[in-house]
Amino acid sequence: MNRSGKTVKRNLLFEGVGIHSGKPSVVRVMPGLERGIFFYNIERGDEIPATADFVTDTRRCTTLGRGGEKVSTVEHLLAVCFAMGIDSLRVFVRGDEIPILDGSSKELVDLFLRGGLEETGEERKVIEIKEFFEVHIGDSFAMGIPGESFSLSCRVDYNNAHVGVQSLHYNPERSDFIKEIAPARTFGFYEEIKSLLDAQLAKGGSLDNALIIKEDGYMNPPRFPDEVVRHKVLDILGDLALAGGDIKGHIVAVKPSHSLNLLLVKQLMKI
């Protein structure tokens, strides 16, 4: 399973608004100088390692922080890194949030592919699940199961006739992350919008960057019949990047959230 780590060949630049802050943000991605993915605030230069130890908030996104600095909504960028084997990167952010772009990782995949990747020559760390384990929050739970390679099964269950119960099995040896997972957008329920705004969240959300679901149907057309669970898989992959290596074994997640994903990652880091 061992494979060489990767980084970008050249500097990459993208910009947009944060889905929660509603504020503009500019991001410059640069080749790593050492193993690890690190975020930096452009104005202050503070370094925030992309590991579970530096997660400061998991409400509706994953936020990394150190001291008084933070960068939010890192999961879509980190999902690309995890799926494409990128483990050496410097990410400079002007602002406090990674831009949401179209709500998925599709534009980030395109950016990385256009810029090109190169191997670092160092083997990626492998985290092998040797014994079954389980973490849970209420009726949500995730399991780690020994296996010969990485795979992920996810199940979501919403009280909405148009979403209902959705399940997906992702195996990178047989699944195409670029076509099947990366384009899946973040989503939200129309009835939750006011409470999210009251909590100072989703201020940059729109029909251009999120799939919005009402009781009587979708406000904008889904890209996949099961786009909701596909996006949940995207989020899990992004959070799994915080474990710092490839995973050997099978992950099962039922009704996942970023909070549950963090518990899962912390358990993986103990192996």
Image (cartoon, helix red, strand yellow):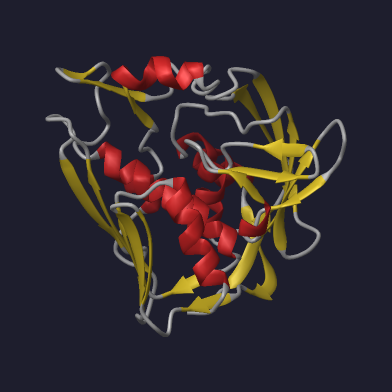
**Residue placed furthest toward the bottom:** 130
> Looking at the image, which is closer to me, 144 or 89?
144
In the shown orientation, is residue 124 left or right of residue 137?
right
Residue at 70% x, 52% y: name it.
9
Q: Quadrant of the C terminus?
A: bottom right
**Residue placed furthest toward the right:** 44
Residue at 57% x, 64% y: name it.
243
> Looking at the image, which is closer to me, 179 or 261?
261
Residue 147: image location, x then y, percent? 34, 80
When asked about the image quadrant of residue 87, the answer is bottom right
**Residue placed furthest toward the left:** 161
Residue 260: image location, x then y, percent? 43, 53
In the shown orientation, is residue 231 left or right of residue 74?
left
Residue 208 is at least partly visible in this image: no
When asked about the image quadrant of residue 158, the answer is top left
> Looking at the image, which is closer to me, 266 or 105?
266
